[in-house]
Image: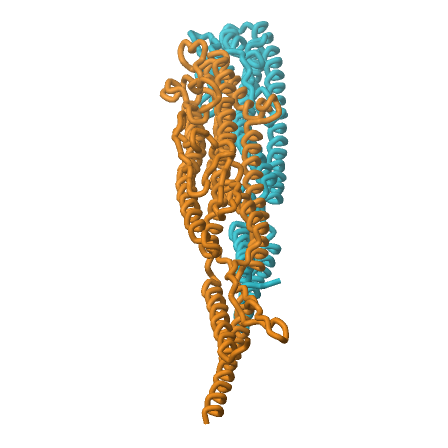
């Protein structure tokens, strides 16, 4: 076969281009840390990574929502706690009113204390989370319980509020009037009537009120238990979502990250190839019969 | 009858022949780097023999012709691989643009879509919140802008390809005009029986350049003229040249390629032009169609669920407004997608609930869920899947074009090497020729001086 300078030049250029392309690729991998820098580097891995990024972004949003929801549930829990304490106070006031040693003065003081418990329950029931009333159902901007001339009336609705925790779990996130306050016996119905009963020393009404308060305390405990188990569920879902994201992150890395050890050794090899190709060419170029003619 | 003068003539012819051969060698060396140059060779032959009593004896050497050493078969194969590699070069170049520029290929569109659905999810945490509603509007506007930009980027790539097509048509016309005029010159030169070597080299080079633009068929007629045709249409016949026209047509003002009266745009199979046409008329429009389908699905799915909800107006708007302005048909949806201006102007028009109660988040949850449901491609893909599959398609196309380009380039190098092995100038070979012809020239000169000596001997001896 005849070998011509143009062939040698062409082959040399092709080899040096190849070698430099490999150097370039290795350098890109090392500087970006990524094996897949554009779609065509590995279309399958790139599109998988894109899917994974979408799923992770949904998870991130769910995690943020759940953090918020957990705060709301914790607030609800502490509101129930304080309501429970208020009902406890009301119970002990009623027990004192039934002690048989009361005087009109002390009854009046007890009635005032019961009035105080009612007011405290009323303000507790108007608790807000982030500007929304938690016991109004879906009418979150309406104050749920309002005192209209000694009687507490309900202005919210009984609609549940739902929230998605993850792709499969949706839970009810609010305690409604029907769940807790409406009864029977109704929380504010009992608290509304007790001060007058104490003032009037109507022992049968006070006794009936006391047993109603007992029932109400049970309902509060039931609701608190529901909220408690919801908080646990949220925590469980949160840790599942977080570990899902970790798994996705590592899968995405596996798909698109460069193996740095491999990239660096490939960079060394390709650099070597460039210098060897250059040396070889400089030797080959020297050799021609022309040089030996005198 | 032999004479010393006859012998002198033998020496003269030899000197001239070796000198001419040296000139051919020099010309070869001079053109060692000339693209398309085919090495030439002086064909030496013994002069007509003279009858003598001792039998016929030659009368020296003649240069019969100076021929080009070329392999027609290799040239033809090279032409065809040049068509393939130029086509893939064009396709790979433009697909690289698609994947490096477009928001579809990068994270842009995917992130915009995630942010949009996540905003519904966030709104579900407090459906009455105006800040959350406003941030949903901004996410939606970000999404529509990203769709519009993506569509625009793809259109621009098509426009660039179109401009390159017009340019390619001009180059083709200048090459065919050159081949036509070379045809004329070659017939004129060869009319007397000689070889128009350098003109033929020039024509072969023009033909290869033409092959890099368009797929061509050609044959050489008896008179040495080359006829070139493409897609069944003649480009060059003898010195008659039919120029291609790039004719702008509706609706996009893209140029169709016209030969005579025939539109050959869809029939071009090879060369840069076919790659450009493929990019402009097939590959990128496919991506645009996918993008439009995606955008129209976003519009329709969101609107269907959104209009089933209730907004925060008192009383609630019934039915709730379309979230996105509806578009007619799928084509162009990505370019046209826009948020309903009424909703964008007052976020309370967002229908997050289903009862009219401000805290009702049922519809916001349903809208957020759309982002995770397999509701596209006959219930097989989520929105994120649809983007990923479009990306995978772009990536696979770019990878295929790249690897075909590499393969074709390797074949091209191989064929160019094979052609050079036959037709290229080897400096070693020329050096050998140089010595060969130099020595022959020197020997012939010596021979003449010997004959001269003999003549002098005769003149002086016989004259004395």
Report the residue at 49% width, 45% height from top.
B226
Quarter placement of the N terminus of chain B = bottom right
Front-most of residues A152 and B424: B424
The spot of residue B176 in percent (x, y) is: 43, 43
The spot of residue B55 in percent (x, y) is: 63, 73
Query: In the rendered view, does B249 fall on the left or right side of B403?
Result: left
**Rendered image quadrant of residue B132:** top left
The answer to whether any part of residue B385 appears in the image is: yes
Q: How is the image coloured?
A: by chain
Residue at the left extreme of this rendering: B345
Residue B20 higher or lower than B223, as above or below: below
Q: Colour of chain A?
A: cyan
Residue A35 higher or lower than A192, as above or below: below
- Chain identifier of the orange chain: B
The spot of residue A37 in percent (x, y) is: 53, 45
The answer to whether any part of residue A115 appears in the image is: no
Residue at the bottom extreme of this rendering: B464
Report the residue at 49% width, 47% height from top.
B223
Front-most of residues B338 and A107: B338
The spot of residue A32 in percent (x, y) is: 52, 50
Q: How many marks?
A: 0
Report the residue at 57% width, 16% height from top.
A91
Front-most of residues B197 and A205: B197
Front-most of residues B204 and A290: B204
């Amino acid at each position: 076969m005849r070998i011509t300078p143009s062939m040698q030049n062409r082959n040399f250029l092709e080899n040096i281009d190849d070698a430099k392309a490999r150097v370039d690729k290795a350098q890109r991998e090392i500087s970006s840390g990524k094996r897949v820098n554009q779609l065509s580097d590995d279309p399958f891995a790139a599109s998988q990574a894109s899917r994974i990024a979408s799923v992770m972004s949904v998870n991130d949003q769910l995690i943020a929502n759940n953090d918020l929801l957990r705060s709301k549930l914790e607030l609800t829990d502490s509101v129930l706690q304080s309501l429970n304490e208020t009902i406890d106070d009301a119970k002990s006031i009623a027990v004192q009113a039934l002690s048989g040693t009361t005087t009109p003065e002390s009854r009046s003081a007890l009635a005032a204390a019961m009035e105080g418990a009612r007011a405290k329950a009323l303000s507790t029931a108007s608790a807000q989370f982030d500007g929304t009333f938690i016991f109004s159902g879906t009418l979150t901007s309406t104050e749920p319980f309002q005192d209209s001339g000694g009687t507490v009336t309900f202005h919210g609705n009984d609609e549940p509020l739902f929230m998605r925790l993850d792709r499969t779990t949706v839970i009810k996130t609010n305690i409604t009037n029907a769940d807790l306050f409406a009864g029977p016996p109704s929380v504010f119905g009992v608290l509304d009537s007790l001060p007058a009963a104490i003032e009037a020393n109507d022992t049968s009404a006070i006794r009936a009120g006391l047993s109603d308060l007992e029932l109400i305390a049970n309902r509060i405990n039931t609701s608190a238990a529901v909220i408690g188990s919801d908080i646990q569920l949220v925590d469980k879902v949160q840790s599942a979502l977080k570990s899902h994201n970790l798994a996705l992150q590592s899968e995405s890395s596996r798909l698109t990250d460069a193996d740095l050890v491999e990239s660096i050794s490939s960079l060394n090899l390709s650099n070597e190839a460039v210098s060897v190709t250059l040396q070889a060419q400089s030797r080959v170029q020297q050799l021609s019969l022309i040089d030996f003619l005198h | 009858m032999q004479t010393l003068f006859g012998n002198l003539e033998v020496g003269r012819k030899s000197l001239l022949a070796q000198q001419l051969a040296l000139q051919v060698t020099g010309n070869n060396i001079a053109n060692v780097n000339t693209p398309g140059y085919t090495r030439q060779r002086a064909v030496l032959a013994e002069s007509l023999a003279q009858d003598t009593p001792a039998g016929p004896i030659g009368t020296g050497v003649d240069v019969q012709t100076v021929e080009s050493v070329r392999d027609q078969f290799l040239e033809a194969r090279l032409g065809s691989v040049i068509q393939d590699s130029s086509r893939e070069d064009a396709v790979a170049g433009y697909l690289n643009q698609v994947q490096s520029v477009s928001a579809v290929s990068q994270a842009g569109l995917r992130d915009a879509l995630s942010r949009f659905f996540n905003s519904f999810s966030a709104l579900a945490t407090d459906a009455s919140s105006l800040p959350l509603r406003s941030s949903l509007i901004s996410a939606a506007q970000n999404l529509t802008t990203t769709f519009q930009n993506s569509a625009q980027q793809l259109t621009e790539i098509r426009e660039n390809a179109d401009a390159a097509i017009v340019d390619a048509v001009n180059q083709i016309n200048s090459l065919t005009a050159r081949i036509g005029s070379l045809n004329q010159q070659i017939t004129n030169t060869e009319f007397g029986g000689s070889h128009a070597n350098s003109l033929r080299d020039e024509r072969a080079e023009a033909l290869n350049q033409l092959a890099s633009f368009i797929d061509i068929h050609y044959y050489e007629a008896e008179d040495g003229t080359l006829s070139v045709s493409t897609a069944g249409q003649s480009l060059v016949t003898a010195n008659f040249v039919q120029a291609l026209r790039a004719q702008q047509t509706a609706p996009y003002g893209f140029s169709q390629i016209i030969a005579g009266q025939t539109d050959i745009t869809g029939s071009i199979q090879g060369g840069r032009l076919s790659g450009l046409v493929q990019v402009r008329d097939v590959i990128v429009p496919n991506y645009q169609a996918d993008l439009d389908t995606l955008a129209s699905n976003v519009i329709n799915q969101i609107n269907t669920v959104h209009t089933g909800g209730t907004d925060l107006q008192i009383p609630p708007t019934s039915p709730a407004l379309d979230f996105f302005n509806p578009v007619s048909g799928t084509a162009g949806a990505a370019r046209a997608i826009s948020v309903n201006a009424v909703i964008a102007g007052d976020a309370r028009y967002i229908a997050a609930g289903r009862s009219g109660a401000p805290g009702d988040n049922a519809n916001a949850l349903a809208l957020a869920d759309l982002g995770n449901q397999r509701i596209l491609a006959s219930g097989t893909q989520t929105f994120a899947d649809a983007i990923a599959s479009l990306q995978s398609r772009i990536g696979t196309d770019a990878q295929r074009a790249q690897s075909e380009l590499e393969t074709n380039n390797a074949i091209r190098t191989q064929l160019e090497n094979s052609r050079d092995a036959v037709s290229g100038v080897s400096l070693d070979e020329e050096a050998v020729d140089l010595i060969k012809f130099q020595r022959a020239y020197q020997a012939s000169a010596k021979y003449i001086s010997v004959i001269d000596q003999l003549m002098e001997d005769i003149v002086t001896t016989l004259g004395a």
